[in-house]
Amino acid sequence: MVAAALLGAACVAWAAYPAGATGRSGVTILVLAACCVVAGAARLAATGLAAPQASRSSYESTPLRLWHTASGTLLRVPWAEGALLGALVLEAQHRSRPWHTGLLGAALLGYLIATHLAESAAPRGALRRQLPVLAAGFGLLMLAAGAAFLPSAGTGLSADWLRVAAAVAAVAIGGLVLPR
């Protein structure tokens, strides 16, 4: 739980790092993404608690009703996905180098996986069967970051090799994902 929260905070900070002239919208998105990370951490902390029932009694006090509504909202809203979207928007608002975006993509995938594992209380080797697909996904991410380093992929030998590598990777991913 702590690792997922720290990874989420690091992702949001990394996405906002080259703070350029994003203005108020960048600050607003940064605050919203940080709030999503904090709410996601609170959700992970409250995962073991019982979900509040929809209607306990018609005669509950207002503070108790507010508490039930807030805790229900905390458990229902997908906060990790909100933090992911916020980090992606922050990354898109400034010009950054391909390695910066590739590292952010790998960290965001790690954040989502860590959050899912913490929410589901999965055992230690839960992702062992998905390891080939995860490795292929990280490989495609690094291939995309490497392709962004090329000056132009319009024509020439480098563009041909890039197209061949992308086609081979797509076929390999398709083979890994198909059920057996």
Image (cartoon, rainbow, N blue to C red):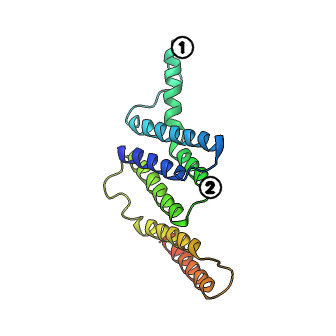
- Along the line of sight, which residue is nearer the eye, 114 or 128? 114
**Residue 161 image position (x, y, % from top left):** 58, 85
> What's the mark number on residue 92?
2
Location of residue 58 with respect to 130 vertically, above or below: above
* Mark 1 residue crowding within 10 angstroms, few (<14) / some (14–19) / many (20+): few
Residue at image mark 1: 62
Disc 1 marks a residue whose amino acid type is Thr
Q: Which residue is pictured at 52% across the width and 67% down the height?
A: 141
Query: Which numbered mark, 2 or 1, is in the foreground of this view?
Result: 2
Is residue 178 visible in this depiction of the protein?
no
**Residue at 40% of width from left, 66% of height from top?**
131
Q: Quadrant of the N terminus?
A: top left
Residue 29 in sight from this viewpoint: yes
Q: SS for tag 1?
A: helix
Q: Residues within 10 Å of mark 2 (few under 14, many from 20)?
A: few
User: What amino acid type should be assigned to the residue bearing mark 2?
Assistant: Ala
Compared with residue 110, is residue 75 higher up or lower down, i.e. above or below? above
Q: Position of residue 46 (x, y in %)?
A: 40, 34
